[in-house]
Amino acid sequence: MAKKDENMSCCPPADIGCCKVESVITVDERGQTVLPKEIRDKAKIHAGDKLAVINWEKDGEVCCISLIKVEELAEIVKDRLGPMMKEMAEK
């Protein structure tokens, strides 16, 4: 078994070209946050949109949290599971 690097992040590597720090936000006493308008506009997030919360864990603790539009997540799942379901149906 390979030795685990304790300093290694649990998140996808930054060199994949899709991730960067856009802003720093604060969690209020009720656990709520506000996505800055610039980010909402850039991501085309509007009032009423549904976002899925995705997290990565390292050593049993959440280390990274991402948001993805539910519609995008559904497309990803469909793209990944569709071919497998078709293959299973053919057997």
Image (cartoon, grey):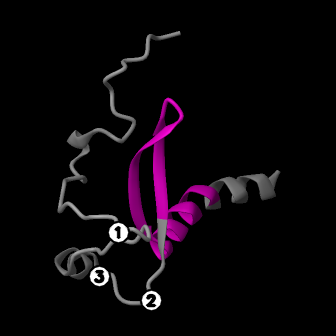
Q: Depth check: give the residue in front, 91 or 80.
A: 80
The residue shown at (63%, 61%) is 82
Q: Which residue is mark 2?
A: 48
The residue pinned by badge 3 equals 44
Q: CA distance from mark 1 to mark 3?
A: 24 Å
Across the whole image, how many numbered discs are drawn on residues? 3
Residue drawn at x 48%, y 62% is 53
- Which quadrant holds residue 21? bottom left
Which numbered dot is residue 81? none
Type of amino acid at the residue the image marks with label 1: Asp
**How far, Cα to Cα, is label 2 from label 3?**
12 Å
Foreground of the two, 77 or 24: 24
Amino acid on which the number 2 mark rests in the picture? Gly
Q: Answer left or right for 21 relative to 7.
A: left
| In the image, residue 62 lies in the stretch drawn in magenta | yes
> Rounded to the nearest whole Å, what is the CA distance between mark 2 and mark 1?
21 Å
With respect to residue 18, does 28 lie above or below?
A: below
Crowding around mark 1 (Cα neighbors within 10 Å: few <14, some 14 to 19, many 20+) is few
Residue interval drawn in magenta:
53-81
